[in-house]
Image (spheres, rainbow, N blue to C red):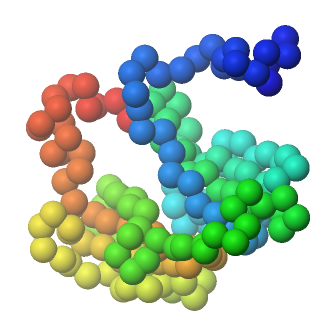
Amino acid sequence: MSADGDSTSPRHSLRPQTARWTHLALRVADIAASISWYERHTPLRLLERREDDQGYGAWLGQPESASSPFILVLAHFFPATDPFAGVPTDVLAPFSHIGIELPARSDVDAASARADADGCLVMAPQQLPDPVGYVCMARDPDGNLVEFSFDQGVYETARRIWGDAATSD
């Protein structure tokens, strides 16, 4: 509800000028453990953490992408007020995953070493056929898979096909 009490009035003045892909949401069992995992293993940083009658929420993203944000939403629902109670909790696996492209092959090796040390490495680094590239996989605290890759060509392909409009992060 907006400050003037009208629930149909927009609450925010800054919004995209066209439809944008803004977030991916995951249900989590322990919000603090999930925030900690994503901040340790990915370039994502906590943007905002909230609590309401239904549970805890957190937005994680990359600070340098503020002009075109893509956010990972984490939601930890309270059992008594869970709006999805009774609905099976699925995870991103075995192929479904969150992908993080890294700037160097050695960064994949470093991500793999961190995940291995933390006991969450699922797939050691390996070179896969184009366009997959050099990848490893780790499992977050809720069982979702996160892929760390090098040389997938996402940036190059987007810029080649979409041009300069794709250069802003």
Q: How many marks?
A: 0
Location of the C terminus (image quadrant): top left
The residue shown at (34%, 58%) is 101
Quarter of the rendering containing residue 142? bottom right
Where does residue 133 sit, x and y in percent of width and height? 20, 68
Side of 31 where 101 appears, left or right:
left
| Residue at the extreme front | 86
Q: Is residue 47 above or below residue 100?
A: above
Where does residue 112 sit, x and y in percent of width and height? 43, 78
Q: Is residue 167 above or below residue 55?
A: above
Quarter of the rendering containing residue 31? bottom right
The residue shown at (36%, 85%) is 124
Side of 33 where 168 appears, left or right:
left
* Camera-nearest residue between 138 and 107: 138
Location of the N terminus (image quadrant): top right
Where does residue 52 sit, x and y in percent of width and height? 85, 47
Regarding residue 114, the answer to whether it shows in the image is no
Quarter of the rendering containing residue 74? bottom right
The residue shown at (57%, 88%) is 119
Q: Is residue 157 above or below residue 85?
A: above
Regarding residue 112, the answer to whether it shows in the image is yes
Side of 124 where 13 appears, left or right:
right
